[in-house]
Amino acid sequence: MEDRVRTYELRLTAVPSRFEAVRRITAAHLRYWKFTSLVDSALLGVTELLANVHQHAAGGEECVLRLRAAPDCLTVSVHDADPTLPVAREAEVWEVSGRGLAIVAALSKEWGAQVEPDGCLAGKVVWFALSADPVRPEPLRAPQVRRILTRPRLTVDPLRPSAPLRTAPLVLPGGGLDDDEHRVPVRPGRARPVAVPLR
């Protein structure tokens, strides 16, 4: 991944019927930016922040989702028109809601909320950051090959006992050889490794 910051902004209405489309858009951008390992955590955090806007924002359900991808960090923020800052609380075991910010705090390396009077929506922004290792290409590796038996084993064809057959070792696609008991009979003088596709 290039050493530069990439951003994406989506203005939407935070209603549950739109959440699935927003998750798909977010996942597509993260995969394109090579942040595949962060997709699940980011989608869970996005869903929780949008649900908070839907349930608690007094300024309406309109909001702006922003993704900011640096080489080693992804920041997700949701801006809405309500200046009231959210307060994290510990939900009782019998409650079915009230854990959104606790979930966001658990999955991210840091999170926060602040009033934003002059932003795209005069209200507040709630954000969280996920750390990621920079994406580097995998080094090319030579296949590991084990030594082939120098003297092929002779076997006898049960249908033609007078015609001995030589066997060739199976060569697997990864470069390794199968064990001695999985060998393919071939005619004398034509013994060669046989490629066997993995299933």
Image (spheres, helix red, strand yellow):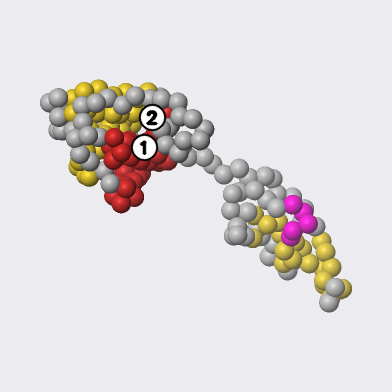
In the image, taking residue 143 as reference, residue 180 lies left or right, namely: right
Q: Which residues are magenta?
A: 179-183
Quarter holding the C terminus is: bottom right
Residue 44 sits in quarter = top left
Q: How many marks?
A: 2
Camera-side residue: 89 or 162? 89
Q: Main secondary structure of the magenta part?
A: loop
Residue in view at x 59 percent, y 49 percent: 174
Q: Is residue 112 above or below residue 37?
A: above
Residue name at image x 28 percent, y 40 percent: 54
Q: Position of residue 31 (x, y in %)?
A: 35, 44
The amino acid on which the numbered mark 2 sits, given as a three-letter code, is Leu
Q: Label for residue 2?
A: none
The magenta stretch spans residue 182: yes
In front here: 123 or 142?
Answer: 123
Is residue 67 among what the camera can see? no
Query: Based on the displayed image, in which of its 4 quarters is residue 118 positioned?
Result: top left
Question: Label 1: few (<14), some or many (≥20) within 10 Å?
Answer: some
**Which of the two labelled residues, at mark 2 and mark 1, occupies the earlier sequence position?**
1
Q: Is residue 142 visible?
A: yes
Question: Given contact means CB atoms under 8 Å apart, are the residues at marks 2 and 1 in contact?
Answer: yes
Give the residue type at disc 1. Glu
Q: Is 120 on the left or on the right of 7, as rendered? A: left
Residue annotated with mark 2? 101
Identify the residue position indicated by label 1 in the image: 48
Q: Nearer the viewer, residue 40 or 118?
A: 118
Say which element carries label 2: helix
Q: Residue 99 at x, y = what percent?
A: 42, 32
**Which residue is more in the foreground, 176 or 121?**
121
In the displayed image of the protein, which residue is found farthest to the right? Answer: 161
